[in-house]
Amino acid sequence: MSYLVESSQVVLRGKDKAAERVSVRKHIGRTVLLLGTTSLLTDISSEMVSTILPIYIVFALGATPLQFGIVDGIYQGATAFVRLLAGVASDRKGRHKPVASLGYAISAVCKLGMVLAGSSLAAIYAVVYADRVGKGIRTAPRDALISLTAHPKALGAAFGVHRAMDTAGAMIGPLLAFGLLTAAPRRYDTVWVVSFCFAVVGVAVITMLVKDARTAPADPPSRRAAMASAIGLLKVPAFRRLTLAAGGLGLATLSDGFLYLGLQDRMGFAPRYLPLLFVGTALVFMALAVPMGRLADRVGRGKVFVGGYLLLLGVYSSLLVPSISPAVLVFYLAAFGAFYAATDGVVMALAGSLLPEELRASGMGLVTAVVAAARLFGALAFGALWTLGGVDAAVVVFAAMLALAILVAAAVVVRREVAPVAA
Amino acid sequence: MLRSRAAVVVIVAALCAIGGAAYVVLAATSSSDPKPATLSGSKHKAARLAPVAAGPLPKSVLVRAVDPEKATLEGRIYRADPTGGGTPKVQKDPACLRFYQAGGSALCLTVARSGVDFRAKLLDRSGDVRHTLTLTGVPSRARVSPNGTLGAMTTFVTGDSYTSPGQFSTRTTILDMASGRTISDLEKFTVIRDGQKIHDQDFNFWGVTFARDSDELYATLATGSHHYLVHGRVSTRTLEVVRDGVECPSLSPDGTRIAYKSRDGKPWHWRLHVYDLRTRADVALAETRPIDDQAEWLDNARVLYGIGTDVWVVPADGAGKAQRFLADAASPSAQR
């Protein structure tokens, strides 16, 4: 509990110190905007590739997208441990920027790797895996940096700004990739090269312009001890409850793709318009990320976080009705985008407010590792349930699991929530 | 200090912008399709097959070239000698991901010019494109009925299900090859099992094969953990479950047997089997390597299938052994 007291008294840094009634920029900090810029550029880069990758694999290599999907799903889950390791490594040195930069740099190099991999399926899988590892490495130290540089009262807003910029990149990337392939048909290499260019500028921004937030190197400095103190964070009751709640909610979260296919099936439009569902959701996420973050800062981050999952539960209900109208579809997309806005950054703001500075990245790595592992396990369980009992039964079980996880989260996160941090 | 660092970022950004733009301009101006390369060297060589007394051999076997190193060659259609031997000759120009020809019309599933979308091209006897359809999903299987009137194609409708292990969705449509119109989707057919109508949201169909009258068909219906062989008619829009454990059926020219792939316990491992529709006898074929293809009958005694980048042939009675039929090829269709 002593951690809680410490973190609510975080000393403000630099010029922001004097700010009482502050502009967004001062509240959020230059670092958050620069990290947002890096994420925007990196997301343009990575979404360009992931939009084109399935089609490239089928066209150039004759592999089935299904095989690729299974490998990729497992890769995503397999980065869970990397996430924890990266967080611990950056706390050990008390420096977050080098580890986050390394993660961005690995993913940038992977884009060139796509050019070199050519048509070797094994090489492409290796590059995709390295890219996921890069993503796993950078997440915890970068989120730690955001939480360490933003005003503690504005953590939700700071993460909101970052996620809004990140999502903007995720929307630009696919458009750019389609545009390139229209200009130069079948020259997939142009996609990899342009993607590499964006990633390089993203790495330049973080390495050259972002100021590291140094924390005291974790004591003791041995790797084993650092890992032990990361795991030891689970002894902090508030953090343990958050990790448990986030893991439970992650376990009951259905994949986006499945929800989109469900909506498409119930409305009966052509599957080629499926990407529009992604665009609609991302637009709402982008628009609401900052307002939701501010709301979280004002009324309590736990309330907004759990409320977000209530919205997700509402979205699940679309899978249990026989058909939906266009107006209802818009409602569901808005709810789904709002779910992301209320949870994706807010959970890190919540973790940030519970973790001591010197173990900030370790704790954030731990939460994301638990969530990544829970989501992979959930996806596998969903597949098994579907095979055993049919898709409707699987959805009902997952809706019930989510409802239960929400109740648990409400009990352990919201009820115990320390009074709103903001005045 | 900060100013000089900002200058570095601006310079990096400018270099990346110029370099990236130059690359795109070069690619865009040089990507007008060059002439297709020709088959040469040791690639695309056929092995000579032992003669078998099993009714008439097809006049020829069409295949699509598989050569990822030569993008201009990949997917082109070639005509090969059914006895094996010799170098196959260039047939037609379109680059196909899946190809099948029968009764004088052909179905070619291919990538759109932009490279971000898939198309079905319906070709006539002379190989000219009569109709082009936009596909929903990624091409998986293509078949044309023996008299060339009906086409069937299966696509993976993935959404982004490749991030969700264990979940996928397929779409199988029946086409009128002359008009280019979609006749129906197998998901709209009535399915009967043990005299009862069945339906489930998780129904997935794939791998159509047509009988000689070009109305009767077989296909795979996946639901729950079952992979049913279904048999029915396009004219009546009905399908009846024949048995379980059959994927990608292929009906023999004499209409008596089904060659299919059977799961052998390991994930993504299938083995070729032949099922006799009259005696219900089932044999595993001599090919023991895992396969993922819809078999094609060379004659009434042998089936063709793809493994890796080659087409192989194996006796349909479980005896003998697998033999390479044609190197660097896929999607065989026997021209009877």
Image: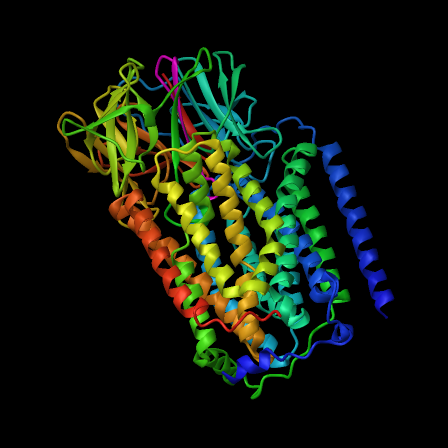
Q: Nearer the viewer, residue A210 or A59?
A: A210
Question: As drawn, which residue projects farthest toward the bottom?
Answer: A220
Q: Quadrant of the C terminus of chain B?
A: top left
From the viewer's perspective, tell me whether residue B224 is left or right of residue A313.
Answer: left
Residue A387: horizontal and vertical position, in percent?
28, 46
Q: Is residue B211 left or right of residue A157?
A: left
Residue A75, given in percent of the width and then of the height, sits at 47, 57
Range drawn in magenta: B143-160
Classify B258 as above or below A259: above
**For the point 61% across and 49% down, which residue is it?**
A286
Is A174 placed above or below A241 here? above
Nearer to the camera, A100 or B227 = A100
Is residue B88 among what the camera can see? no
Residue at 45 percent of width and 55 percent of height: A309
Count of numbered tags? 0
A305 drawn magenta: no
Above or below: residue B232 compared with residue A325? above
Instruction: Classify residue A122 as left or right of residue A149.
Output: left
Q: Residue at x 39, y 34 (%)?
A: B170
How far across and how far down the image is residue A164, in percent? Answer: 63, 53
What's the residue at 34%, 16% (across, down)?
A: B146
